[in-house]
Image: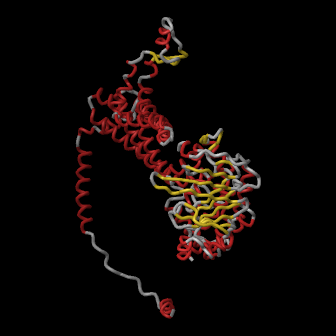
Amino acid sequence: MTAEKTATERARPEPIKAVPVRHPGRWVTVAVLAVLAAMFLHVLLTNDAFQWSFMIDHMFRPPIIDGLVRGTVLMTISAMLIGVALGVVVAVMRLSPNPILRGVAWLYTWFFRAVPRLVLLAVFGNIGILWSRIEFGVPFDTHLGRLFGIDNLELRLFGFDSRDLLTGFMAGLLGLALSEAAYMAEIVRAGIQSVDPGQTEAAGALGMTRGQTLRRVVLPQAMRVIIPPTGNETIAMLKDTSLLMYVPVSMELFFQLDAVGKRTFQIFPMYVAACLWYLLLTSVLLVGQYFLERHYGKGYGRSERARFRLRNVTAESGGAPGGTETAR
Amino acid sequence: MTEATIPAQAAPSAAESGPMVRAENVHKSFGHLEVLRGVDLEVRAGEVCCVLGPSGSGKSTFLRCINHLEKINAGRIWVDGELVGYRERGGKLYELREKEVVAQRRSIGMVFQRFNLFPHMTALENVIEAPLRVRREPAAVARQRGIELLDRVGLASKLNAYPGQLSGGQQQRVAIARALAMQPKVMLFDEPTSALDPELVGEVLDVMKDLARDGMTMIVVTHEIGFAREVGDSLVFMDGGVVVESGPPREVIANPRHERTQAFLAKVL
């Protein structure tokens, strides 16, 4: 008691003025990096092979911008939309009590994760070889017809030429989206499994069905775990659209830059242009990812906790508005 | 779960004066571990039944069997005369479909040790979620009732607070309001104060006493001997997966007859 009293009465001592710890290593690192940066800059500015004026002149031409918008950007968005939607479905199937759905989901992720994307795209680009027309109707209709003694029985509702459907953009989209769905399924599954099982129990005890529980309780909480890797997947997808060259999809950024390079025999400058374009695009996505993660971290993140602490402080100093409520 | 492990019995008549909750020879195993080894229990409407016992005695498991969060291996449980989790026809048991199980749970409220509030919803949203989605009440009605319920548990000023911003005691009171919102016939409490700081236990017990006074049928798994003595109409002592002793709380606590009850009470009192 007396010790406390003297402690509060004692004058505040003068602030500490100590010599901070020196970090000579940092200065050495800075010096080394400065030299390396200077060398890099020197190469950029003096090496003629870069052909800067040629590159800048060609990297904004209409076909390239067209390929950028309709190929790279649109393809990234479409493939991710389909991939995420299908991925959620596959993940839910994978966690279903139904063993058949579980098996199908496992088979799906196994196949699409085992085959490299580049190979997958090449296969989808050539899948038109299997069927000249794609038609919807009764399966095995001609075989069934033969069984009943009818020749050439055709029970088909509609169809289209596979050259119209399964080449270029559609084949590429199918390849990228299906493969993405397999990766997203694993991400969503991890997200769902990260949610406290007590949440599912509480929802069940309230009489919510499994579907309601998933939609209203589990998935919103799983989002916090799902969103960051999905951002990474989107960035990876943007870069992987360059693989569309092997479908081939001509209306795409890298294909167009490559074409210009090959036509003009200035390949290297156009590859540098590709680097710059992809750097720019992924940087935009990184900014978007930052804001998205901040949004879904709501109620968990540091900023929220800090704000709450602040509110407590004001409540304590100004008298708690809740009266007798005890705040943690 | 096969039919053969459950002895076929004639279904009892769901008389109005019958017990609200009736358990008969309930067995439950997790793999080779037999957690419940023949539990019998009767709780009348409006009765507060406190379940005591050392940890691992099967109290919580038994509670979770009552609303079919756990499937029992043998025996029968009835809530308000309705067999839980199964339908009995011609001496044969049929598992209920998910929808039917879920419908049964609507009349059985449950409060968990770890609260299990939905962290992404405010207190009010937590309370009105099930009335809106499960009972399909109009939004205005659900909201009004939600506010009344939160007011009843003393949290009228915390409607829009997220669970993370509430103390443990406040969270548990929201959880009680959430269970009450479904207008259950029975409330199950699974060690509702065990995860709370000692100074927050009182506020939750007060809400539960209030509920008991209003005539709610309650089964409370607890370590709060004081609460059992003061509020409980009956006390059940469980150990090793069976009911060792039961009776009026004051009697059992003052003069435990079974040696295991004596040993347990000697340690906690």
Height in image: A1 above or below B11? below
Tell me how the rendering is colored. Answer: secondary structure
Residue located at (40% from left, 44% from top): A282
Quarter of the image for the C terminus of chain A: give it.
bottom right
Query: Where does residue A128 sit, x and y in percent of width and height?
Result: 40, 19
**Total marks in image:** 0
Query: Where does residue A120 sit, x and y in percent of width and height?
Result: 36, 30
Q: Can residue B156 be seen in this view?
A: no
Q: Check the image and name the residue furthest to the right.
A: B16
**The one of B102 and B236 positioned closer to us in this rendering:** B236
In screen coordinates, is A133 left or right of B117? left
Query: Where does residue B259 sit, x and y in percent of width and height?
Result: 54, 72
**The one of B4 and A253 positioned closer to us in this rendering:** B4
Query: Where does residue B129 sit, x and y in percent of width and height?
Result: 65, 51
In screen coordinates, is A54 left or right of B73? left
Height in image: A178 above or below B122? above
**The one of A62 and A45 positioned closer to us in this rendering:** A62
**The one of B65 and B145 positioned closer to us in this rendering:** B65
In screen coordinates, is A124 left or right of A158? left
Q: Can residue B175 be seen in this view?
A: yes
